Each structure stands twice: as structure tokens, then as C-alpha cells.
Image (cartoon, rainbow, N blue to C red):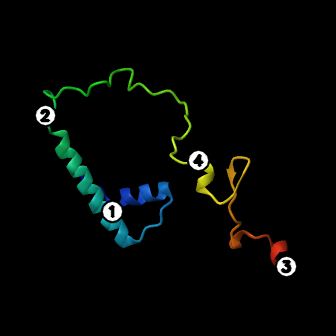
Amino acid sequence: MAVTREEVLRIAALARFKLTDARVEVLAKELSTILGHVEVLATVDTASVQPAEGVGAGGTPLRADVSSPANLSAALETFAPEMKDGFFIVPRLATHEDAADSAA
């Protein structure tokens, strides 16, 4: 299956991509190659292959959405020079100083 230049331009317009003419041609060739590989894969006989275990109509069971405390070998306070109320205190970046701070 060959992807045309017009199809690439349409997809690019939908995705709001700007493409050069050279890039459109390259993408058309690359997408055609990918679809060619997919066509080859579609010819593989999978009738004798057993389905994956554990995947059925209900899907894969999910684990419970719970968190647990981190199992650290050292106390949390050892990871930062300063903490307050269980939070790390980090110095303010010079690029994030207020205009009032720099005028003083």
C-alpha cells in the first residue's frame, strides 16, 4: 500500500504540522514502507498459535490502586540539608526571583 503525498499533507494538516516539500516526500516513502511491513505480517498464519495466557474477555486484572510508604534505608531527613513540616526546603532559583526582590 503506497501512501500518497496528498495523504501525508492531509494528515499533517489534521495534526497541525508544518512540513517542507522534501519532508512530505520522505514521510510518504517511510509510511509506505511501514504499511508494507504490516501487510507482510498480516500474511503470517497464526491459527496454530495459542492465545496469550491470562488475557480473556475480561482483560487483565488490575492491582489495587493503593500506595505504600517508601522503603528507605536512611531517614528522609538525610536527603536534604533542611526540612520543614515533612517537606524539603530548597533555595529559590535566581531566575525565579520577584522583580521587587531584584529592585531592593
Residue found 70% across the figure and 73% down from its top:
94
Q: Name the residue beneath numbered marker 1.
A: 27
Q: Name the residue beneath numbered marker 4.
A: 75
The residue carrying pointer 4 sits among few (fewer than 14), some (14 to 19) or many (20 or more) residues within 10 Å by Cα, namely few
Q: Amino acid at mark 3?
A: Ala
Comparing 89 with 2, the one in front is 89
Q: Name the residue beneath numbered marker 3.
A: 103
Mark 2 or 4 closer to N-term?
2
Residue found 50% across the figure and 27% down from its top:
64
Give SS at disc 2.
loop
Q: Which mark is residue 45?
A: 2
Picture coordinates of residue 72, whole percent (x, y): 52, 44
Relative placement, left or right, of 41 versus 62 is: left
Q: Are marks 4 and 1 in contact (CB under 8 Å)?
A: no
Q: Are marks 2 and 4 in contact (CB under 8 Å)?
A: no
Q: Quadrant of the C terminus?
A: bottom right
Mark 4 or 1 closer to N-term?
1
Comparing 28 with 102, the one in front is 102
Mark 2 or 3 closer to N-term?
2
Comparing 7 with 98, the one in front is 98
